[in-house]
Amino acid sequence: MMSVPVSSTQMSAGRAAFSPLRVVIADAYAATREVIGQVLAGDGGFRVVGAAGTIDETVRLIREAQPDILLVDPWLSGPAGLPACVAAKQFRPGLLLVALLPDDREDYIRAAQALGADASLQKRLITRDLMPVLREVLSARGS
């Protein structure tokens, strides 16, 4: 299900004009973090404020950078990553969490939903689907 495309300006409604949404990227692979950063750089509505390769780095960045969006592999540090993602939403309640999944297996999707993910995305589809997924979730949230 796709919603009508939303511009970066519309996505940041309620914020100062042209104020980009702040994003933290958390994935064990630098190449994945780089690709996501490139996709987001193509849209002025987002600013990457940090990238992490471990769950400890991710938690530190969330506290320091106060992002609006966390793009995270929920298994970043093995099973311990799941509770850390839940904790991130507890100390940053408005945080939009997008789970980066290895594929579309139902158990992965259910686990992402259980940890409080607002959306999920297969890693192999990042270049094609990241922006539409973010637009969909932001539109649904009224951001």
Image: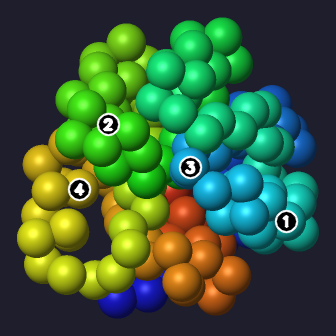
Q: Is residue 83 left or right of residue 136?
A: left
Q: Which mark is residue 81?
A: 2
Mark 3 or mark 1, whichever is nearer to me: 3
Return the disc, 4 or 2, that comes first in the chain's sequence.
2
Question: Where's residue 131, x and y in %?
Answer: 64, 72
Do residues under tags 3 and 4 come within 8 Å of each other at their CB atoms?
no
- Which residue sits at x=20%, y=69%? 109
State the SS at label 3: loop
Do residues under tags 3 and 1 come within 8 Å of each other at their CB atoms?
no
Return the disc, 2 or 3, that comes first in the chain's sequence.
3
Q: Which mark is residue 112?
A: 4
The residue to which callout 3 is attached is 28
Q: CA distance from mark 4 to mark 2?
A: 11 Å
Return the disc, 3 or 4, that comes first in the chain's sequence.
3
Residue neighbourhood size for the residue with mark 2, other residues' Cα within 10 Å, grouped as few (<14), some (14–19), many (≥20): many
State the SS at label 4: helix
State the SS at label 1: helix
